[in-house]
Image: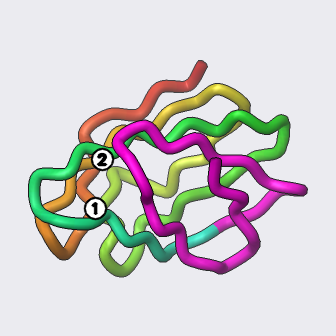
C-alpha cells in the first residue's frame, strides 16, 4: 500500500496498487513503469484521493477516488493512460 501525500508523486510497485491517505489529497505525478504495464489504483482509505489529468497522467478528467473506487491505467513507457474508472 502506498500512502499518498499532497502533491507527491506515486511510484507504482505492482499491477494492483492499493492507495491510502491521512486526509483529502491530490497528486498530478505518477511513475507507471515500462510500456505495457497495467496499473489498477484502488483507494482503500476513507479519505478522497484526487488524481489530476496533468503531465504524464492522461485521464478523461481529474479523477476523485473515494473509498474502494478504482482507476485502471496502461503505461506507454512515458505516460499513464486511462483505461477505466469505477466509482464504487
Q: Quadrant of residue 56?
A: bottom left
User: At numbered mark 2, what does the secondary structure look like: helix, strand or loop?
Assistant: strand
At horizontal 41% and vertical 74% (from top left) the residue drawn is 54
At horizontal 14% and vertical 70% (from top left) the residue drawn is 77
Q: Is residue 64 left or right of residue 80?
A: right
At horizontal 41% and vertical 33% (from top left) the residue drawn is 85
Q: Which residue is mark 1?
A: 80
In the rendered image, the residue lying farthest to the right is: 23
Please give the label number shown on residue 54. Answer: none
Q: Quadrant of the C terminus?
A: top right
Alpha carbon distance from label 1 to label 2:
6 Å
At horizontal 78% and vertical 38% (from top left) the residue drawn is 45
Tell me which label, 1 or 2, sits earlier in the chain: 2
Q: Which residue is mark 2?
A: 73
Does the magenta-highlighted stretch encompass residue 29? no
Question: Relative to the observer, which residue lies in front, 52 or 29?
Answer: 29
Q: Is residue 40 left or right of residue 24?
A: left
Asked if labels 2 and 1 touch by Cβ distance under 8 angstroms, the answer is yes
Question: At which x and y percent is residue 73?
Answer: 30, 47
Question: At which x and y percent is residue 81?
Answer: 24, 55
Does the magenta-highlighted stretch encompass residue 11? yes
Q: Is 10 above or below relative to 7?
A: above
* Chain part drawn in magenta: 1-26
Question: Relative to the observer, which residue lies in front, 9 or 25?
Answer: 9
Amino acid at each position: 500500500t502506498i500512502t499518498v501525500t499532497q502533491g507527491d508523486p506515486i511510484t507504482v510497485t505492482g499491477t494492483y496498487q492499493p492507495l491510502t491517505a491521512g486526509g483529502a489529497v491530490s497528486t498530478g505525478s505518477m511513475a507507471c513503469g515500462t510500456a505495457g504495464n497495467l496499473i489498477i489504483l484502488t483507494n482503500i482509505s476513507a479519505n478522497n484521493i484526487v488524481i489530476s489529468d496533468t503531465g504524464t497522467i492522461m485521464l478523461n478528467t481529474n479523477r476523485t477516488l473515494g473509498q474502494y473506487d478504482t482507476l485502471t491505467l496502461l503505461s506507454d513507457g512515458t505516460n499513464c493512460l486511462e483505461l477505466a474508472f469505477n466509482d464504487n
